[in-house]
Image (cartoon, rainbow, N blue to C red):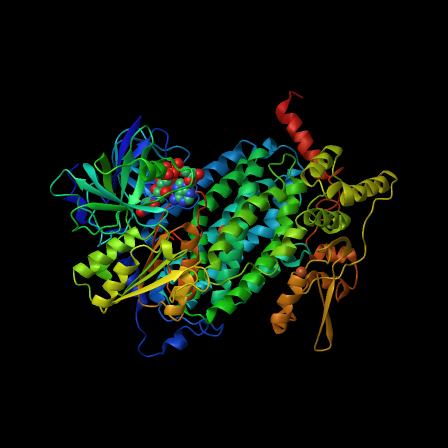
Amino acid sequence: MSYQLTIEPLGQTVEVEEGQTILDAALRAGIYLPHACCHGLCATCKVQVVDGEIDHGEASNFALMDFEREEGKCLACCATAQDDLVIEAEIEEDPDAENLPVRDFDGVVSRIETLTPTIKGLWIKLDDPDGMRFQAGQYVNLELPGGIGSRAFSIASQPSAGEVELNVRIVPGGQGTGYIHEQMQAGDRVRITGPYGRFFVKKSARVPVLFMAGGSGLSSPRSMILDLLEEGFDLPITLVYGQRNREELYYHEAFLELAAKHPNFTYVPALSHEPEGSAWEGFRGFVHEAAKAHFDNDFRGCKAYLCGPPLMIESCIATLMQGRLFERDIYTEKFISAADAQQVRSPLFRSI
Amino acid sequence: MDMTVAKKKLGLKEKYKLLTRDLGWEPTYHNKDEVFPYVKYEGIKVHDWEKWEDPFRLTMDAYWKYQAEKERKFYAIIDAHAQNNGHLNITDARYLSALKIFLQAISPGEYCAGKGFARMGREFPGVGTQVACQMQAIDEIRHAQTQIHALSNYNKFYNGFHAFADARDRMWYCTLPRSFFDDAMSAGPFEFMIAIGFSFEYVLTNLLFVPFMSGAAYNGDMATVTFGFSAQSDEARHMTLGLECIKFMLEQDPDNLPIVQNWIDKWFWRGFRLLGVVGTMMDYMLPKRVMSWREAFEIYGIENGGALFKDLARYGIRPPKGWDDAGKALDHMTHQFMLALYQYQFGTAFHSWIPSEEDMAWLSKKYPTTFDKYYRPRWEHIKKLKEAGTPYANMGLAKLCQTCQIPTVFTEPDDPTTLCHREVEYKGETYHFCSDGCQHIFEKEPEKYIQGWLPLAAIFQAPLNGDLGAWMEWVSLADGKDNGDFAGSEDQRNFEAWRNQATSNQ
Ligand SMILES: Cc1cc2nc3c(=O)[nH]c(=O)nc-3n(C[C@H](O)[C@H](O)[C@H](O)COP(=O)(O)OP(=O)(O)OC[C@H]3O[C@@H](n4cnc5c(N)ncnc54)[C@H](O)[C@@H]3O)c2cc1C
Ligand code: FES
Ligand SMILES: [Fe+2]
Ligand SMILES: [Fe+2]
């Protein structure tokens, strides 16, 4: 049994299971609510229940007073739903979020291409002639047959493109990515659900943007860059893009062309394991090292968007911070589920 | 779900801005450096005070409302505790020693934190910071008061509670927390925030309150559980203030990094030393134990500290210098401290005792690599002496550490059979230290620590001139009542008699 939890002022609705706390449901859906002790002692997670019935759970009498209970306050870390709920939390409204509704979209795989030995490009033509509205950087859940369930993939194409493009790296032993690589055919019917996620360019800030991408993390940055260039964004855009070797560096030529065409777009490719003596003349090393060298260890004044494997993200964050760019200007999409992400709570940071 | 109409009420953020902005005026007939004279001398460079985040954005009106309600609840519970003879519900009168140490050593620290924050609220120029410090100042005074009030009920019946304020100033084992807080209060505003916000609140508070509160619950002490809950409800705000301060310093200017690193090294070690008292209380003084000090440190120290240091590494901060030495001390510190307390038990305002067989079995289970090997034999020896009618008392005075001010009773990090002792010569005087950590702290600021007042030295000075009885009077210790072995003490006898009365028909 599950209930609908609507979180104001975002207006976003998420599922909450019987017995699951409001905080847990929100965090798993990628919505940050302030919290600290997670045991009903500190009141950091206090929210207002606007509609619906809750159970207060283990909320301490010192953290949630009687008068507050009467006013409909609750501690999100302990409260569970007894009903569909609407809560109001102290969430800062994001002027760049369009809060697009999530919907199911049916379509057909129009083509599949091998982009690198480990990554396939997948183009989906949606039945709905209007396509799907999304913000560049967001992702979809792709439903797979045979009980595999759905898997998350970022959209690699820009919103104006006619088809939805996904770039899927095969995970060794992975059921879903294995299916896509080995069995999926052009002409197959598929369903995607989306758009999801709060990873998009903070255009309203009007500052230069830096993208750092590695592995299969190129999709979102690519979509965001194509979108920015298309709408005439005139501040500097830099893409630092890393792969292991030249073979894996897909869309290299396309980015070189974009850089030649748009003076405000700079493209910095980096290869970490390219055989010595090969024809590669670009940077050799990891993404964070390439970025540090390119920016001469000074990232002040921009906003950075990171996408890729956890280890890459971690090194990039440390490099940015030591180059004096901090949490308020760093955005990431981690390719791990929200459940994994919650295991270690950071005492200092909320979102990176 | 039509809620478009109600939507225009002020958000907390705007409300907070409106309620604080008038504090942020620009002085016109004084320059800012004169108004905030202490904010620069530590070397911390700040370019933009607006970047100080106060995620709580608690406004004063809301603050008063909450705290008043907490107080009403708290006093209702401790009144009931007093009326129902709650003191007879504790497991055993040995538990009282833990409370006495808490009252003598920790509650005055809360009060010092309150004084410190009151000053910092004045010394920091940022408005968000001023408001947060002001609230924390009031919180800390409230913590001290609620603790004193909760424990005053025990003072009506038992010894050792009556002179906690004198003990705080003059008792040798209380100098550990006292020197910690005096050091913090006499530091500059940014260092104070690291001392209290990082070391005391983040690293220590969980270790202090969570195991201590569960210890109190386990041992039937509802008054303490209540002040614990009441204080805990403020802690998230306190920790956040400290951690935001560290972030703020590190983000404002790269030159702040080495200064912050040095403070983290210093205050980690000071905090770790301070925990010696708490750990000993946990391992030896709770008749019913929740977890060992080692286990608590693994959860709250290593896990929480580890998470924080991992985050701080992104700024280029490395784990505190004393981290490895602390790890090596984990299996020894509480045993060595308890042995010290026992052998000077004629000079403590609480009772100690030789651990029972059952206690020792528990200790060897919790400290499998050290207790049986190093500490059980000493307790057995002490027990034999006592049975022979020649109980062991150490009438000598150990060297005192010039930094943390306790007797040098701990051992070398890599050799638990050799006492650790360091010396430094400074301006023709020799100063002693209990550890490398304390020595390094001294060497960074010798002019500060040579001014340290070590109250135990008073015993050899005029007017006490080595007279133990006069010293006891000076520290307000009632000989034969407050001090000595638990076995045969007035507390033990009274508790048993009263409990019998309460639970039988005689
Ligand atoms: C928001 C989001 C966006 C994403 N965007 C993309 C994208 O654009 N392109 C893309 O290729 N992938 C992307 N991913 C990752 C993708 O969802 C997973 O690789 C996929 O779900 C794996 O499914 P599977 O059935 O093949 O593996 P499973 O059968 O689910 O897992 C097989 C094994 O691989 C491990 N595993 C699964 N996923 C990962 C991972 N990401 N990293 C390391 N180990 C893993 C599992 O723990 C398990 O041991 C994204 C993930 C998220 C959360
Ligand atoms: S997070 Fe502390 S009360 Fe909920
Ligand atoms: Fe406190
Ligand atoms: Fe010391």
Of B252 and B235, nearer the camera is B252
Residue B20 relative to residue A100: left or right: right
Residue A245 placed where, x, y %? 40, 57
Residue B273 position, x and y percent, is 63, 55
Question: Dividing the picture into quarters, in which one does residue A95 lie?
Answer: bottom left
Residue that protrudes farthest toward the top in the picture = B505
Where A261 sits versus A18, above or below? below
The quadrant of the picture occupied by the N terminus of chain B is top left
In the rendered image, the residue lying farthest to the right is B388
**Residue A51 seen in the figure:** yes
Q: Residue at x 59, y 60 (%)?
A: B180
Q: Nearer the viewer, residue B232 or B444?
A: B444
Quarter where residue B130 is shown: bottom left
- Report x, y in % for residue B338: 71, 47
Looking at the image, which residue is at 53% across and 56% down? B199
Identify which residue, B111 or B314, lies in the foreground. Answer: B314
In the rendered structure, the answer to whether residue A91 lies left or right of residue B249 reads left
Q: Position of residue A277 (x, y in %)?
A: 45, 65
Is B435 positioned to the left or the right of B259 in the image?
right
Quarter placement of the C terminus of chain B: top right
Q: Where in the image, quadrant-wise, is ligand 4 located?
A: bottom right
Count of numbered tags:
0
Question: Does residue A196 show up?
Answer: no
